[in-house]
Image: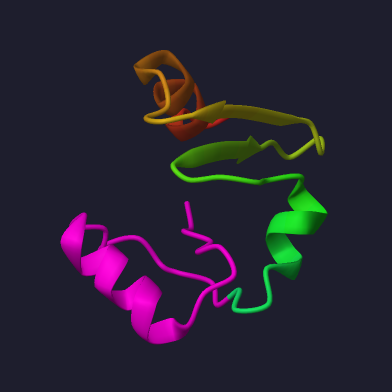
Amino acid sequence: MVGVPGGDSQDSYRKFVAKHQLGEIPQVANEDGELWRQLGNSSQPRWMLVRADGSIERGGGTPPPDIVQDALTPA
C-alpha cells in the first residue's frame, strides 16, 4: 500500500499525511499530478487496488473492509 498525493508540493502533502495520521504508509511524490492522471484519479480521498493481474478496483473514501482483507490475503 502506498499513498499518492495529488499534484501538490511535498510540504503540503507532508502536512496532509501528518494531519490524517498516514505516516505509516509510504508516500510517492506526485507534485505534477502525472501519476494521478495515469491512474485515472481526480479527487481525494480515493483508494485504488491494483491487483497482480493488472485489474484495478477504485472507490472514494475509505475502502470497504472486505476489499482490504482480500488485498492482504496471500494468493
Q: Is residue 21 above or below residue 60?
A: below
Q: Residue furthest top?
A: 66
Q: Tell me, yes or no, whether the highlighted magenta stretch contains residue 14.
A: yes
Residue occupying the point 40% across, 23% down: 69
Residue visible at 40% across and 18% down?
Answer: 64
Where is residue 37 shown, x and y percent of the image?
77, 56
Which of the 4 quarters of the picture holds residue 40? Answer: top right
Q: Main secondary structure of the magenta part?
A: loop
The residue closer to the viewer here, 20 or 2, is: 20
Quick check: is 26 in the magenta stretch? yes
In which quarter of the view is residue 75 placed?
top right
Up the image or down, 65 lies above or below 6; here it is above
Instruction: Estimate the x, y position of residue 12 in percent, counting from the top left.
Output: 36, 77
The vertical placement of 66 against 74, above or below, is above
Horizontal side of 20 relative to 67 (left or right) equals left
Q: Which residues are magenta?
A: 1-29
User: Residue shown at 69%/36% (left/top)?
Assistant: 51
Question: How has the structure been colored for display?
Answer: rainbow
Q: Position of residue 46 (x, y in %)?
A: 51, 39
Label count reads: 0
Residue in the picture at 56% in, 45% down: 43
Q: Which residue is at the front of the view, 4 or 44?
A: 44
62 left or right, relative to 30: left
